[in-house]
Structure formats: C-alpha cells, structure tokens
Image: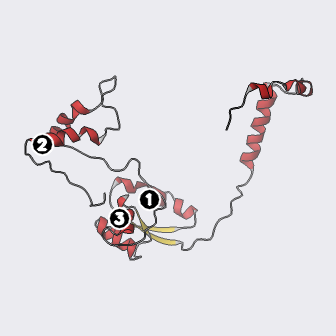
Amino acid sequence: MAPLSRAKFKDLTIWRPRLAGKLSRRSLLGAAGAAMMLAASLPASAAPLAVEKDELKFGFIKLTDMAPLAVAKELGYFEDEGLFVTLEAQANWKVLLDRVITGELDGAHMLAGQPLAATIGFGTKAHIVTPFSMDLNGNGITVSNTVWKLMKPHIPMGADGKPKHPISAAALKPVIEKFRAEGKPFKMGMVFPVS
C-alpha cells in the first residue's frame, strides 16, 4: 500500500469555513470523553454460550506454573463463566497425560511438549488440543555454581555489569564442549522426556 502524501490532502480549505468557530481542542476532548463515557455505560452485547460440560476436573503437577488454575478457582473465575472446576494433583507428568487421554481428566496443566508428542505418537498416541499456554519462554536450565562460573565469560553483560536477560543456552555450549574435550561427563537432568 502506497503511503499517503500531503498532496492528496492539501486542499482542506473547503472545510475551514464549515468548522470555523465550531471545533476547538476543548470541545473535541469533551466530545471524545462523552463518547467514551457513553460506550462504557452500555451493557455488554455478548450473550453467554451454552457449554458442552459445566463440571470439569483439571489435573496439575504441584509447581508454580499451575498458579493460573489455582487463582482462577480461588477467585471464582471459572464459576463466573458457568464452570464448576475441581483441581486434582497428579503424581507425575505421565500419569497426568494418560488420565487426559483416557478422559479421567477433562484438562490439565501440562508440559508444552506433551500434547505435541502425543499427537505425533511419541509415547501414547492421541490427539490432544492445546487451547492456550500458561507459560512464557518455556523451560529454563538451572546450572551449578561451578558451571555458572564457566559460562559467565560467554554471557553478554549490561552496562551495570550484570548479565543481559534472557540468557541464551548458547552460553552453555562452550562449557559442554570443554567437558567433552577433557573427557568429563556433563550430567543433565530433565523433568520429562518431552519437556
């Protein structure tokens, strides 16, 4: 799309006599404020939709990323939408996934990779819909103090001398290569194979 040029709007002089004395900044702001007040006072026009099932059981693992579910339950957000939700802690990620697949749970807080892995057949094959994600930027990598000291030379620093965030896993690569070159194992753990 071509940018608008001033040439197209240069002949606005025809409007000046019609608007002379009628528009001021004060009257324009007043009109805008009145329009906003009117819009805010109108009732919402969205009608509630019929729900397929109003009693739901959601599974979760006892981690901080399940907080949106706990907050929604405790503050009544589910009930505000006509949903009666039970939250049920699960023993581990595998149990949680299996119970969603079998229908014992209506939904769950899951690792981002679990629905994808199930859909492509890694582990139990099942089609799982992911309506929304409750996290931002995925998982983090936590390292020991020893590894952190080895990573620091590879981390960009800000003017204040502190590491720039987010810290890329690329800063860990030279450390792993150093361990490999020295014939040392670099042990890492993960919470679940598709995490």
Disc nearer the start of the sequence (1/3): 1
Q: Quadrant of residue 25?
A: top right
Q: Position of residue 72 (x, y in %)?
A: 48, 58
Mark 1 is on which residue type?
A: Leu
Disc nearer the start of the sequence (1/2): 1
For label 1, the residue is 69
Q: State how far apart marks 1 and 3 are (Cα).
A: 23 Å
Q: State how far apart marks 1 and 2 are (Cα).
A: 41 Å
In-front residue for pair 32/165: 165
Q: Where residue 179 is drawn, which disc sits there?
A: 2
Disc nearer the start of the sequence (3/2): 3
Q: Is residue 145 above or below residue 120?
A: above
Q: In the rendered image, is residue 132 in sight?
A: yes
Q: Quadrant of residue 143?
A: top left
For label 3, the residue is 117
Q: Residue furthest right?
A: 17
Within 10 Å of the Cα at label 2, are there few (<14), some (14-19), or many (20+) other Cα atoms?
Answer: few
Q: State how far apart marks 3 and 2 are (Cα).
A: 31 Å
In-front residue for pair 147/178: 178
